Amino acid sequence: MRRIKILVDGDGSPVIKITEEVAEKFGCKLIIFTNYAHQVESDYGQVKKLDIESQSVDMEIINRVKAGDIVITQDYGLAALVLGKGASVINNSGNRYTEENIDHLLARRHFYAQMRRANKRHPTHSKRTPEQDENFRESLIRLLERRD
């Protein structure tokens, strides 16, 4: 049986340490992808540094992900492609991207981009909370235990 890989879109990810702890507990292979502009280190996983070119991290994740793996990203476009390969995807708050919700999320991203181009305001992200960290940890564990 193939060992599950956890692949992290690591540019600015606030959950690397939590992911390391959970991956080590479950014996998963962990690969954190980042570009050379970010300082990312890992005590457990492999850090893969890539060019600063646009989409280089996303393309490397797409090329390496397999069905059954888990990807951690905030990027809806990457999430849609990963879902198409049969992998699970969660964001830094522990929310899952699924076939059922990805179209809505992509449409919302498009709408917000239109608002920005028109110089209109839209909701922004609030400061990270300990509850988000715990929700992320619990969601990742549930995925690894395949309870949902």
Image (cartoon, rainbow, N blue to C red):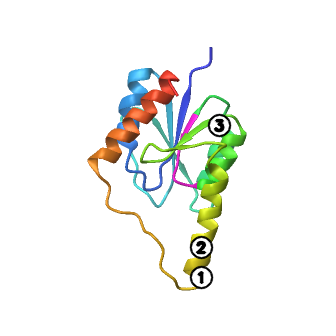
User: Which residue is at the front of the view, 129 or 61?
Assistant: 129
User: Which residue is at the front of the view, 27 or 106?
Assistant: 106
User: Which residue is at the front of the view, 117 or 11?
Assistant: 117
Mark 2 in CB contact with mark 1 (< 8 angstroms): yes
The span from disc 3 to disc 2 (Cα, nearest Å) is 28 Å
Q: Is residue 42 visible?
A: no
Per the image, label 3 sits on a secondary structure element best described as loop
Residue tagged 2: 113
Magenta stretch encompasses residue 38: no
Residue tagged 3: 65
* Left or right: 1 in relation to 90: right
Q: Residue at x 60, y 63 (%)?
A: 108
The span from disc 2 to disc 1 (Cα, nearest Å) is 6 Å
**Label 2: how many residues lie within 10 Å, few (<14), some (14-19) or many (20+)?**
some
Find residue 110 and report its horizontal and vertical position in percent. Answer: 64, 68
Relative height, residue 118 to residue 50 (above, below): below
Per the image, label 2 sits on a secondary structure element best described as helix
User: Which residue is at the front of the view, 144 or 42?
Assistant: 144
Residue tagged 1: 117
Mark 1 in CB contact with mark 3 (< 8 angstroms): no
Q: Which mark is residue 4?
A: none
- Specify start and end residues of the magenta stretch as a single range: 70-75
The span from disc 1 to disc 3 (Cα, nearest Å) is 33 Å
Q: Earlier in the sequence, mark 3 or mark 2?
A: 3
Q: Residue at x 65, y 62 (%)?
A: 107
**Label 3: how many residues lie within 10 Å, few (<14), some (14-19) or many (20+)?**
many
The amino acid type found where label 1 is placed reads Arg
* Left or right: 40 in relation to 64: left
Find residue 31 and report its horizontal and vertical position in percent. Answer: 51, 37
The amino acid type found where label 2 is placed reads Ala
